[in-house]
Image: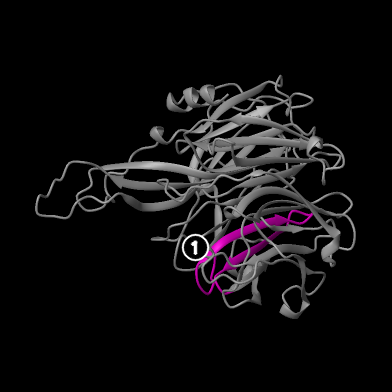
Amino acid sequence: MGVLLAACLFNACSCSSGGGGGKDGGSGGGGNSDTPTHFFLPTAPGDNTAAPSLAVDGAGGIHAVYPNYAGGGAYYAYCANGCKRASDVSFVRFETDGTANNAMIALTAQGKPRVLLSAFDKVYYGTCDSGCTKTSDWKVTAVLDHGGKKEVSGPAFALDPQGRPRFLLHTYRTAFGLGMGDPVTEYVTCDANCHDPSAWKTYRVAEQLWHRSELLFDAEGHPRVATIARLDDDAEGWIDTGAYVECLGDCTQEAAWQGFPLAPAYYDGNEAIAIQPTIALDLTPSGKPRILLLARSTESQKQVLYLACDESCIGADEKWSRLALSTNPELSDGVDLALDAQGHPRVVYSLDYNIALASCDAAQCEKPEAKWTLQVVEAANAMKPDEVFLYPNCDVGAWFLHTPSIVLTQDGGARVGYQSRDVSGGWIKKDPNGPDCVAGTDMTWSRLAVLEP
C-alpha cells in the first residue's frame, strides 16, 4: 500500500477513491472528484496560522478554527456548501493571552459553533448562536486559569448529546519531562451558564498523562477516547502508547474510566517538521470504535495503523483487528480518520509532506483482503513556489504540507484541512559576504481542500 501511495503523490496523479459521510453525519457512496479545490484560509494581514480543526453542519457548511502560529489569537472561519476560494470564507479573529497552542471546534445539533482555545496559562470557551461572522456575534471567556501547569492537546473537546461542553486536560508536557508536574489527566465539564468559570467542574480520571487525545460521545452519552498515553517503562522511563479509553458509568469517578493500550506511538523531533505522536478516533453508526494511529513498528519504523473493535474493547488484545495501511519511510506528521454513515473509513495522512486520502467501502476494512483506494488531496510540488520571502542567501522555497484533518459532508464530499509551511533552503550563496543560508519556515498558513462527491 505504501508503494502505491508514494507513486501517486510523487507523480501528482489521481487514484480512484470512494465518497464519504463521516464524523459529522455524511451519507457515503459515490466517488470523490479527481480535482480537489485548494485555498488558504483567510487571516488578518501579517498573521501566520497553524493546522485547522474542522466541522461540517447539516447544510454542508464548513466551520474551521485555527490558531495563530505565534503571538496569541485564533480564527474562526465559515464557508457555505459549495465554497471554492478564500473570498467565499467569512472569518473572525479571537484574542487570547499568549499563544493558542490548540484550537478546537464542535457544533451543536442545530449547527451552532462552540470553540475551545488552549493557551499557555488559560483555556477559553467561545459560543455563537447567530451570524457568527462578526466579533460581536461571539462570546469568548477564559474559563480556566491553570498558570501554565496544564494543557489541552489534540481534538480533546466535544459536546455530549445534550450539547454540553466537555474536554480532557492534562499536566503540561516539558522537554524530556524536566520540571514537569505529576502526570495527571482530568475530565472537565460544564452543564449550564458555561461563560461563568465557576460552572466548570474538574474530575481526575487518571494518574497518567493522556495527551493528543480525541474525545467523542456515543449515542448514549458515553465518552470514548483515543489517546497517546505516557506509560512508565523500566527500561526507557516512559513510552508514548496509542490507547483506547471509555467511560460507561459515573464519569466523575476515576474508576469508571477504563483504558487499553494498542501499540507504541511514533514520534521524531529531528525531522524537518517534527513528527508528533498522533491518533484519531471515530465511531460506527452502532458506536464501535475505529482508530487510526501513527505507530512505531517492532523495527522502530513508522506505520499508519487502522484498528477496529466490535465488542469487549477493554482488556482483550485479540478483540482488536489491525491493518498497516502504510509502512513507507517517508511518512510525515499527522493522520486523521472519519467514517461515513455506513461506517466506511476515510483516512488522511502526510507522506513526504504531501497530503493523501485513502478510502475503503468493504464490510470489514481492517481485514488484509479489504480493498482501499487512494487519492491525492494535494501534492506540495504542484503548489507555486515562493520566490519572495526567502531567508537571507537562500535561493529555494518549497511547501511542506502536514497535520491533516478530515470531515465528510452529507452529500458524499470530503473537506481536508492541513498546515502549509513555506520553507527556505538552497545551496547557491548569492551574496558571498552575507550569512550562509539556514533552512527554515518563512511563513505558514492554514489550508483547506474541497473534494466534491
Q: Which colour scheme is used?
A: one colour
> Residue shown at 80%/39% (left/top)?
284
Residue 8 screen position, x and y as percent:
49, 24
Measured along the vertical axis of the image, is residue 185 above or below residue 243?
below
Horizontal side, residue 259 vs residue 56: left or right: right
Which kind of residue does numbered mark 1 sit on?
Ala
Measured along the vertical axis of the image, is residue 422 above or below residue 72?
above
Horizontal side, residue 20 vs residue 276: left or right: right
Tell me if residue 93 is in the magenta stretch. Answer: yes
Horizontal side, residue 151 vs residue 244: left or right: left
Q: Give the magenta part as a residue range.
A: 92-121
Quadrant in the picture for residue 29: top right
Residue 357 screen position, x and y as percent:
59, 32
Measured along the vertical axis of the image, is residue 221 above or below residue 296?
below
The front one of 436 and 206 is 206
Tell me if residue 205 is in the magenta stretch. Answer: no
Residue 296 screen position, x and y as percent:
58, 40
Q: Name the residue under label 1.
A: 175
Residue 144 screen position, x and y as percent:
66, 75
Farthest left residue?
A: 433
Secondary structure state at the residue bearing disc 1 = helix
> Residue shown at 44%/64% (left/top)?
70
